[in-house]
Every structure is written in structure tokens, then in C-alpha cells.
Amino acid sequence: MKTNIRFQNVLFAFFALIAIMMAIRFIYTGGQGFVFLVWNLFLAWIPYVISSKFSVLIAAPPWQQFTALICWFVFYPNALYIVTDLIHLDLDTIVPKWFDAILLFTASIAGLLMGFVSLLRLEFYLSFKMKPQFVHVVMIAVLFFGSFGVYLGRFLRWNSWDVLQNPLHLFGTIAVRIINPVIYWQTWGITVLLTALFYLLFVSIKAIKVDL
């Protein structure tokens, strides 16, 4: 017998587990460690919510489609960014490493799932706008730019809001790395590796077929 489980329910279960673990950590330490996960998950949730409107945007006026796609694109790297929060395992705390590892890994999976579901929704939307081979190229490009956004956020500490708050400085930082790729080889090395990882995860999710 097959049981259909809505993704929203699974996502809620992830959030509940993360909330419980954070509460346990707060009680154990008496502090507010890892509260940043709440903000990061919220930022990852934004493109997920925007993508839920893609199916109805197919027949919407062009300006609405453009606005939604731009907003989604700006916030999308946040869904992938959470995986880099694993770096916080280096923090010296009284909490067992295994507990923090599970907490950070759970949050990372939740963020990636929201990111890949929203990417699948984008793929569905684009299937009405262009040929399949072009859609696949766009998916790779989105993951590449998303990975670059992860680099900007993790290593240079830029965020999505800076597109509006400090656009000139942000675009200047990006332009320098595009003009001088050899000097900033680490930038593109990290971006390419993350792109490969996220692409393999994405196509793996698409390829999985459960036959009970």
C-alpha cells in the first residue's frame, strides 16, 4: 500500500525537530547558541514560498512573472547556503559535537529540500516557456549562480538584502572576480564544486523512484 505524504507535512516535521533540538540546546547551555538557524531557515523559506506561485504565473502578465522570478533568484542562494552552516561545528561549546552535528545537518537538509522543491517548480514553469534542452541549461546556470551566492554569503558576508541596500559595492565585488578569475581562483573553485554537488543532489532527487 502506498501512502502519499505532502511535502509541507514533511517540512513541518523538519522544523519541529529543529525547534525541539534548539530548545534542548538552549536549556542545556542557558544561552542562545545557533539562533542564527532560525533566520537562515526563514531566508531559505522565502524562495520556497515564491516558487509556490510559479504554476499560476504561467498565464500571468509578463511584469508579474518577471518580478516573481527576480525575487526568487535573489533569495534562492539562501536555500543552498545553510549547508555551509556545518562550519559552526568548529565552535568550542559544552554541547556534545554529535548533537550539534545532527542539528546543523537537519537544518541543512531542510534548507536543501526547500531549495530543490522550488527549483523543480521553476523547471515546471520554464517547461511552458522554452524547449527541454534549454530548461536543463537554465537549471545548471541557476545552481551555478546560486553556488556563487553561497560563496558571497559565507566568505564575503554579503546577503540578499544588499542587492537593495548596497548594490554598487556588491556588484563591484562581483565584477572584480569576473574580470580577474585567475587571481580569485578560490572563488570559482568553491563555486564550481558547490555547483557540482548541488547538481548531483538535484538530479538524484529527480531520479529517485520508490516502487513499493
Image (cartoon, grey):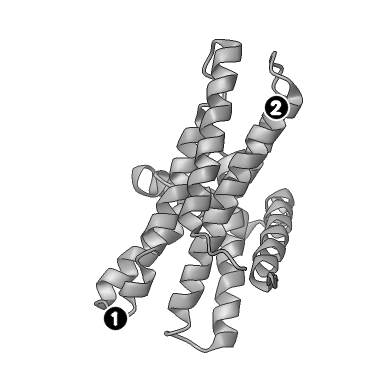
Residue 129 seen: yes
Q: Which mark is residue 80?
A: none
Judge from the rendering whether residue 197 lies leftward or rightward of residue 162; answer left or right: right
Quadrant of the rendering where the N terminus is positioned: bottom right
- The three-letter amino acid code for the residue at tag 2 is Phe
Kindly identify the residue that appears in the image at 52 percent across and 62 percent down: 117
Q: Is residue 67 above or below residue 104?
A: below
Residues at marks 2 and 1, CA–CA distance in whole angstroms: 47 Å
- Per the image, label 2 sits on a secondary structure element best described as helix
Who is closer to the viewer here, 184 or 135?
Answer: 135
Q: Which residue is mark 2?
A: 99
Q: Residue furthest bottom?
A: 131
- The three-letter amino acid code for the residue at tag 1 is Ala
Residue 161: which quarter of the image? top left
Residue 159 seen: no
Q: State the image coordinates of residue 107 (x, y, percent, origin top left).
A: 59, 40
Q: Which mark is residue 59?
A: 1
